[in-house]
Image (tube, rainbow, N blue to C red):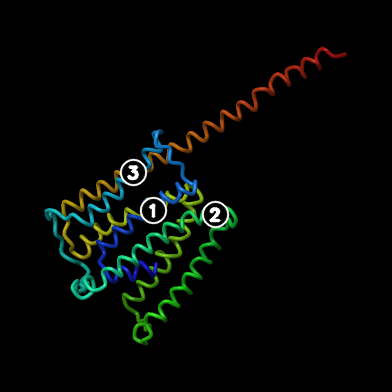
């Protein structure tokens, strides 16, 4: 999380979305290499999952890199100060890129690791508490090293306090617990696939609240993100059906030889003295 925030400070939001959209793709590759996700390109569900991941990534890239014609422009509800791109982005763009790439790789590795953790320690609540506790200590240590002036540590009753509470309660604690629940139920690739929807919500909230323009590229990219997510979920939904059908066949094979045994036993009892 710290890598993402510092990388976002050195670049911009549209550039950071590209690396956020890389997370499901890197997670899918890692899970396939570790044997946690079965590829099965020749099957319908396997090809649907791969196609959905690639379409989601392409849609997020289209949102970030292509603007096109401006369709709508709303009046800004929230007035936010814009940073100078020549002062920050041009000077530390390489550093921000490396930080965002590190965040993408570390976050993608987190999902396969949680599969092993849940197998040994299935209590999701305590696992989320431990993760947030040590993550807070790590962020606190990094903050002391990076910012030692007293003004940066002062908190007042303003939007800064609301941002901290929101990031801690929903953006960190609730997110980790929901991710662990989804990893336990559907595997390591399922939760990060929904992270591509962040680009869609950025477009909606940026247009309504900040007065950003709604362009052709954002609409096309949003359509691709939703389409890719639907295709992936379609392929993922076909997997439990095959598992249950194969499991029911195994049960039938196990139950079938039992019937003649009961029949012969009943015949012996009837024909007996």
* Residue farthest along the right direction in this orientation: 273
Badge 2 crowding class, 10 Å Cα cut-off, few under 14, some 14 to 19, many 20 or more, is few
Q: State the residue position of label 3.
A: 52
At 50% across and 70% down in the image, what residue appears?
A: 134
Badge 1 crowding class, 10 Å Cα cut-off, few under 14, some 14 to 19, many 20 or more, is some
Q: State the residue position of label 1.
A: 26
**Residue toward you, 125 or 36:** 36
Q: Of marks 2 and 1, which one's residue comes earlier in the chain?
A: 1
- Give residue 105's position: percent from left, percent from top: 40, 59
Eye-nearest disc, 2 or 1: 1
Eye-nearest disc, 3 or 1: 1
Q: Image quarter for residue 116? A: bottom right
Question: Are the residues at dot 3 and dot 1 in contact (C-beta closer than 8 Å)?
Answer: no
Q: Please tell me whether residue 43 is drawn above or below residue 181 in the rendered image.
A: above
Q: Image quarter for residue 117? A: bottom right
Secondary structure at numbered mark 2? helix
* Residue farthest along the top direction in this orientation: 271
* Residue farthest along the bottom direction in this orientation: 150
Q: State the residue position of label 2.
A: 116
Secondary structure at numbered mark 3? helix
How many callouts does the rendering have?
Answer: 3
Task: Quote the CA–CA distance across marks 3 and 1.
Answer: 14 Å
- Give residue 213's position: percent from left, percent from top: 16, 59
At 40% across and 38% down in the image, what residue appears?
A: 46
Q: Please tell me whether residue 91 is drawn above or below residue 105 in the rendered image.
A: below
Task: Quote the CA–CA distance across marks 2 and 1.
Answer: 18 Å
């Amino acid at each position: 999380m710290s890598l993402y925030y510092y990388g976002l400070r050195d670049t911009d939001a549209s550039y950071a979305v590209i690396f956020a959209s890389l997370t499901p793709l890197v997670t899918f590759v890692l899970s396939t290499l570790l044997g946690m996700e079965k590829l099965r390109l020749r099957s319908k569900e396997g090809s649907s999952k791969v196609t959905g991941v690639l379409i989601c990534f392409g849609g997020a890239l289209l949102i970030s890199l292509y603007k096109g014609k401006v369709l709508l422009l709303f009046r800004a509800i929230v007035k936010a100060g814009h940073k100078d791109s020549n002062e920050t982005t041009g000077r530390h763009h390489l550093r921000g890129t490396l930080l965002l790439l590190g965040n993408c790789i570390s976050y993608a590795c987190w999902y396969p690791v949680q599969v092993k953790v849940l197998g040994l320690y299935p209590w999701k609540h305590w696992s989320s508490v431990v993760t947030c506790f040590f993550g807070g200590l790590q962020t606190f240590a990094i903050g002391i090293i990076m910012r030692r002036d007293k003004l940066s540590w002062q908190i007042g009753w303003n939007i800064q306090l609301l941002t901290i509470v929101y990031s801690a309660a929903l953006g960190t604690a609730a997110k980790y617990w929901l991710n662990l629940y989804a990893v336990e139920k559907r595997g390591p690739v399922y939760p990060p696939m929904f992270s591509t929807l962040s680009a869609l919500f950025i477009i909606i909230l940026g247009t309504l609240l900040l007065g950003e323009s709604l362009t052709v590229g954002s609409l096309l990219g949003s359509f691709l993100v939703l389409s890719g997510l639907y295709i992936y979920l379609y392929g993922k939904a076909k997997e439990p059906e095959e598992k249950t059908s194969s499991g029911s066949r195994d049960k039938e094979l196990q139950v079938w030889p039992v019937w003649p045994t009961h029949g012969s036993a009943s015949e012996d009892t009837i024909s007996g003295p």
